[in-house]
Amino acid sequence: MTLMTEAGLIRAFKTEVAPIGQFDTLYPDVTTAQIAGLLADSFAAGQLWGFFPTYELDPDVLEVSPDLTPKEAQLVIVLAGIQQLRVRVAMADNKNVYTAGPTTYEREQSATIVVQLLKSAEDRFNRLLKNLVEDGLIDTGVYTIDAYAARVLNDGAGVYVALGGLP
């Protein structure tokens, strides 16, 4: 069983969003339970995307069964990391001005670096997705036919039957 615990996915998540050994310094108020909840949410988000169709998450013990493969576990971690980085970009202060009497101190913190980290994480997600599809671990086949396509193909209901949809 894949557990959302320190020995399971939490350690890997911590190194996803912070340099090794610095997570507790950068995120001092974040608890293990909060990280486990984020990972469980990311697993559920993955299921909404069509990943992990045969997996179950026990919300009481935060346990996924059957076990996730290393690639699937990494996908959950990357999804959680992307979510955390998006929040960090949204919450980033761009400029702080401190004034004490005649002295002024300005500090500008660019979100550019965090945006690049987010793009990098999204690129990793896309590569993981490609690998999972190539390994046959997920099926991303989704067919959408709208009224325009049915009209252009001039075959009405036959289009839906051919693609496995409604007769």
Image (spheres, rainbow, N blue to C red):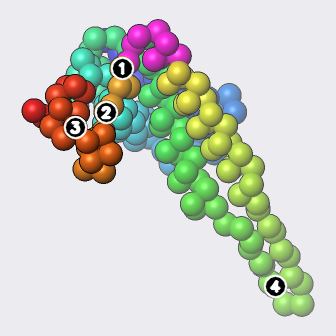
The answer to whether residue 116 is visible is yes
Is disc 3 placed on a helix, strand or loop?
loop
Q: Of circles 1 and 4, which is in front?
A: 1
In which quadrant of the rendered image does the N terminus lie?
A: top left
Tell which residue pokes out farthest to the right in this image.
102
Residue to which mark 1 is pinned:
139
139 lies above or below 82: above
In this rendering, position of residue 61 left or right of residue 166: right
Residue to which mark 3 is pinned:
155
Mark 4 surroundings: few (<14), some (14-19) or many (≥20) residues within 10 A: few
N-terminal-most mark, 3 or 1: 1
Where does the image place residue 126, in percent across and percent down from the top left? 56, 30
- Tell me the tag on residue 100: 4
- Tell me the tag on residue 143: 2
N-terminal-most mark, 2 or 3: 2
Q: Is residue 67 magenta?
A: no
Marks 3 and 1, how far apart at CA:
27 Å
Marks 2 and 3, how far apart at CA:
16 Å
Mark 2 surroundings: few (<14), some (14-19) or many (≥20) residues within 10 A: few
Marks 1 and 2, how far apart at CA:
12 Å
Is disc 2 placed on a helix, strand or loop?
loop
Q: Which residues are magenta?
A: 131-138
The answer to whether residue 28 is visible is no
Q: Residue at x 64, y 61 (%)?
A: 92
Where does the image place residue 100, in percent across and percent down from the top left? 81, 85
Marks 1 and 4, how far apart at CA:
60 Å
